[in-house]
Amino acid sequence: MADINITVDGRKVTAAQGTLLIEACKSVGIEVPSFCYYPNLSLQGACRMCLVKVEKMPKLQTACTTVISEGMTVTTDSDEIRQARKSMVEMLLGNHPLDCPVCDAGGECELQDMTFSYGAAESKYMEPKNHKDEQQWSPVVYFDRPRCILCYRCVRVCGEAMDVWALGVQNRGVSSIIAPNQEDHLECEECGMCIDICPVGALTSGAYRYKTRPWEMKHVGTICTHCGDGCKTTLGVRRSDTGMEIVRGDNRDKSGINGDFLCIKGRYAFDFAHHDDRITQPLIRKDGRLTPSTWEEASALIGKRFADIRDHQGGQSIGVVGSNRTTNEESYLLQKFARIVLQTNNIDHHRTADFPAFAAGVTGKPESTASMRDVFNAPAMLLIGNNPSEQHPLLAWQIRNNVRLHRARLYVINSQEIKLRRQAANFVPIPEGTEGDVASFLAGDDSAIDTAGNETSDALKPLRDKLRSEQNLVIIFGSEIRGDDISSLVKFGSNIPGSKFICLGDYANSHGAADMGLYPNLLPGYHSISDIGIFHQERGGEIPQTPGLTLPEMVESAKADKLKAFYVVGANPVGRLGLDPFSFSQGFVVVQDMFLTQTAEIADVVLPAANAYEKAGTFTNTCGDLQLLKKAGEVNGTKPDFEMIVRIADAMGFDVRKLVPFGRGTRADMGQSRGAQAGEADRHAVWLEAHGLEPKMSPFDPMAILDEIQRLVPGYDVSRMDLQAGD
Amino acid sequence: MRFSEQFESRFAEMLTHYPTKRSVLVPTLLYAQDESGSLSDEVIKEIAGRLELTELEVRNVISYYSMLTTHPRGKYNVQVCTNIACLLRGADELFEHCEKKFGVKHKGTTADGLFSLEEVECIGACSWAPAVQVNYDFHENLTTEKLDNVLDEYRRK
Amino acid sequence: MAELVSHPDEVRVVSRRFGQGATNLDRYLELDGYKAVQKALTMQPDAIVNEVKNSGLRGRGGAGFNTGMKWSFVPKQSAKPKYVLCNGDESEPGTCKDRLIFEHDPHAVIEGTVIAGLAVGSHTGYIYIRGEYRYLLEIMQKAIADAYARGFLGKNIFGSGYDFDVYWHGGAGAYEVGEESALMESLEGKRGIPRIRPPFPAVVGLWGGPTVINNAETLASIPHILLGGADWYANLGPPKNGGTRLFCLSGHLKRPGVYELPMGYNLKKMIYDVGGGIPGGRKLKAVVPGGSSTPLMTPDEIDVPMDFDSMMKAGSMLGSGGVVVLDDTTCMVKFALRIMKFYQHESCGWCIPCREGTDWLKKTLIRFHSGGGLKKDIDNILYLSQNMLGRTFCPLGDAAAMPTISIVKKFRQEFEDHLEGQPCAFEKESKIEQLPVLA
Ligand SMILES: Cc1cc2nc3c(=O)[nH]c(=O)nc-3n(C[C@H](O)[C@H](O)[C@H](O)COP(=O)(O)O)c2cc1C
Ligand code: SF4
Ligand code: SF4
Ligand code: SF4
Ligand code: FES
Ligand code: FES
């Protein structure tokens, strides 16, 4: 699109045709104040804060609704403009309760900021204010009408962006009021987007209300642990009796792949972290009962038993189960520990999507996986199976908003009437369980869908033709499609120029767990066991040559009394996979977890684990985007799985330097971490970290092993600078 | 929910007048209110369903228009214009007279449910002020005596 | 039904058929009805637009934009259907003229609507009538049905091969819905919140299609222009202000009523000759010249021709034709309060300055009128009004601010007289009750 040249406050500004004046100003650092304008939501022109002078126009114009045109000359600051903005704030304050000292938004309120900027604090207003009591609309959403400035952001984000449409405007004039869909309460998805987007304290969250003030928290940017989409989240944490408590999560700064989006889980589900049932001490079974113990005793016991069993019964008599929720570093370390320390390939995890088949399918096809960002920008998308609105909220958000804002075409094939059909240009219902057949059909096998009935095939044929005529199609498929069907789908996609894929898996780091080689037959990066190659050298130890046992095989083996030790890290196979708890009654069972799960209950030793909000490392989302976790919360007494694995290796007498290559990197004078030079130290640290040169001071530093992962696992050699930046 | 045949045939016809269903909403609500006195939850649900709108959307629209109400009114809604032209010709007296006569305030309804009183904005009778609308009937060039006669007739109806 | 009046100075164009039984279609035909549209069917669209442009007809809804010019903004080619929309929401206090047109000459509105459609290449017209005018909606429904029955509307009108549909639409009580873009929202079944402009309705209007929107009186004038010719019409008024208009005389007058007078008719004459002057030997205090939105004028300002340009020059506006006359028994504070109460009640609430400004002003004026005013309030009222002016999302904010500013400026003394507990010289206590807020 052609570029347009305008002049703002005497500066030349060039921006693409169709750009809004407010955005053009922002692009050169000129901030035009706004309440109702919000990027990617429909335009309102309601708050009148963004009034600017456009030459040749008699009245001030709203920068948020004015599209730039060639030669436009604009003034954004003058006495007249400042007065206009000041009076808007004054008028708002006329009916505003000014209860800032007790308001949740105090300290991060856009009305406070604006009042400060335009000096509108002097009150001309003597009339009684319109009062209305605060209302609770749902467990999560509270509404305080007098604080509301009617910017309609909440209404729009709920309707346009979330496609929920639970909020509206009731009455008119000064009686106008934001209204929930059930008259006095809300029935909605409880995503909290409305609360987050509210510029003032009118909408507040039941989870955070009155708990603390913004400036009393520390804010840590990390990755949400609740699903495979990997939203960036900024956690507000503060000290508590038991460590650091997570008070809230948001992504107001829009850093990261999700912009300001978070779903209900990402925004509110923290109670698990400080739950009373958290284990905070190692437990050892004594006289049949799990009894609190010390780390020394627990590590020594595990080290001794693991070493005994390995040395006397052989590594094949030990089974290891990894997790979909631990970091890449932990998963990598766990399989390395299993293979070179325990001398076993008996390692597996709760498998979700068929990532190995997908990896095999796209090998040798560079650029064939789509990132979460690609989903927002693709001209067309095909979704087969899954229900992203529930299982992948960010993905659903990206799809919806790509359709809404970019008029992208969405094609949906599903056995259920999933919500995203509302955005679909074409929705084809199929019988449950035929997703794989559809993949074959798309790849050209017309007979594959014979069983699905005529209606389905009649609908799928024109759809296939349409898809074949697309370009840069993003093909997203659920875990219903596995094995050969994945290769069919990839084959179909390969004939569409520029097409890319996303394979959907359920948990926060399922993709990472798979990539890191939590398989009995696959090494990190899906290399076959037989294809050891460079791994020996890297691993500082010999790897057994035969593939190990899968999880069900381990169970059988335990029942046959062949498997003598079972090491479960962040998984609950008894509870989740219905594994028979008595299978392991004879063996030595070690479990690392946050809670006393059904699996932990049968353990001989239970170690209290930190969750992903409580440690550093990386996660790989379902698209394959690699992202950095930072430690935000803490529960005293727990440790990251990484540290526990290292401790066990150490207790087994293994040289931990061969496990975790710490101590390399540059030693630098980090300067002061407090006082005037603190910023300096931070900047050095950022640069060093960004270049992988930060001191890796101990074997507990997960970053020490990231280098290794990046060398060995295809697709992980992303720049550290980008990883640091969070995008 | 049952409306009159006339309502139904008009509704069906109106739907053919516009490219979107929703367009019939405002007049339909007023006609529905004429039949059932006010826009009850049941009516809202019915109309929302017919027009494929959420009840929230319908409520948002109702609350915008001053003639639409979710609260039942008296059989005769006495709407006294007190806007400028009427004000200059004695609208305040008319309104106060009604307040006393009915023993109710703005938007109140008499105990027998016969009359509601409402102070309204200009009803387009400025040259014949002061004016009162009872339901949809205009009564103009009023004095308190004339208004009494008018109201008595409604009472007798 | 509303009483008709007459005066020798009247020039009957739009009101020509008032009281003639023209709601009856046959009667309407006898009185030259539907001749203009048949003539229009023989004309090129551009020729119709030019004729209207040259007639100097300016919008009778209040803003006074040249009608032919407005029509010429409608794009010739359009992917979406084009529409003609008749604005019969008449709600501006002081205005009661469209009511008479609908009551006495509904077919003229229909005919004007069809001609506008021919001029811009539209095939569908809507006639929006405010909800309070139920009896007029019924008259219109019948008129439309009659016209369909004769083949004047619908497919192949007058056997011309041109299709044109006209539909009626009723409102439900909202002044703001008279604003053109809010009217479209209302017609689409939504809350009457105005739209962002540009794009203007002529380009993006109803359901996204190009839309001509005109006041009922404007459209009812069209057939007369086509039959009488642009020159004839233009010459009825001063330059650029063609024709006649319906003036609604109300307030403290001996002979209030709706009179059709040539554009440019002298305001003073209108009050004293046509309206018969002030009754009871009282004196003139102020005039609202064009509906409640226009700045008030004092007795020494009223020797002006009532046309758009002269009134602008005189510091006020011609507005909607509602001339409200105030005699010297009127309390100007109370009058200002009543106006503000109206705008506060009718503000759609969309934008801050109008929503909050009108509420604040209303509250201050209530306090003022009931004797609680402070000296600084007077400047505060001005300050607030001036800060609303030109900064609201739609012109309703201006409409609230303009009369207020004029009253405070021109009758400041009366505000001073109300200060600090002094009883209102015109009555003892405010009888104006506050409308409930935050219902
Ligand atoms: C608040 C407000 C209320 C209005 N009310 C009316 C009205 O009731 N009738 C009307 O014809 N125009 C009304 N207008 C003017 C319309 O917006 C529009 O200008 C007019 O219908 C155009 O027709 P015209 O060019 O024939 O005058 C109103 C404008 C505003 C800002
Ligand atoms: S919580 Fe989410 S779904 Fe519920 S009202 Fe707010 S934005 Fe809408
Ligand atoms: S509740 Fe908040 S987001 Fe919603 S309109 Fe009010 S101020 Fe804006
Ligand atoms: S000025 Fe603003 S609040 Fe007032 S009616 Fe117009 S848009 Fe609504
Ligand atoms: S930001 Fe432009 S009007 Fe609100
Ligand atoms: S002011 Fe009362 S009818 Fe117009």
Image: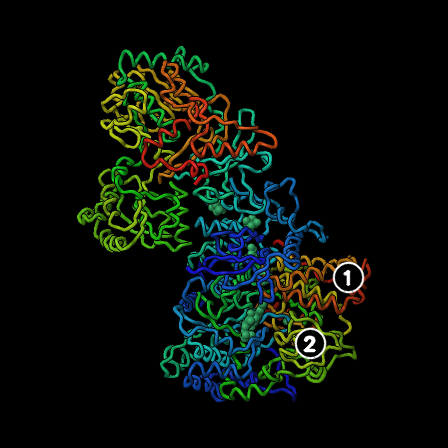
Look at label 2 and name its amino acid: Ala
Identify the subunit bearing mark 1. Answer: C
Residue, disc 2? C314
Secondary structure under tag 1 reads loop
| Mark 1 lies on residue | C429
Question: In the rendered view, does A550 fall on the left or right side of C401?
Answer: left
> Where's residue B66, x and y in %?
57, 62
Classify the position of ligand 6 by quadrant: top left, top right, bottom left or bottom right.
Answer: bottom right
Q: Residue C215 in the image: state x and y as whole percent.
A: 54, 75
Q: How many numbered marks appear?
A: 2
Display coloring: rainbow
Q: In the figure, residue C385 lies in which quadrant?
A: bottom right
Q: Is residue A475 above or below residue C254?
A: above
Q: Is residue C89 visible?
A: no
Q: Is mark 1 within 8 Å of ligand 6?
A: no
Under mark 1, the amino acid is Glu
Rendered position, C318 above or below A680: below
Q: Chain of mark 2?
A: C
Quarter assignment of residue A338: top left
Mark 2 and mark 1 on one chain: yes
Which quadrant is the C terminus of chain A positioned in? top left
Please say if A567 is above or below C222: above
**Residue A411 spot, x, y in % from top left:** 32, 51
> Left or right: where does residue C239 sit relative to residue A286?
right
Front one among C63 and B78: C63
Ligand 1 neighbours mark 2 (CB distance < 8 Å): no
Q: If the image is split into quadrants, where does the N terminus of chain A sit? A: bottom left
Give the image quarter of residue A357.
top left
- Could you tell me if residue A83 is visible in this image? yes
> Could you tell me which residue is drawn at 52 percent across and 86 percent down?
C230
Q: What residue is drawn where x is 44% and y is 61%?
A: B22
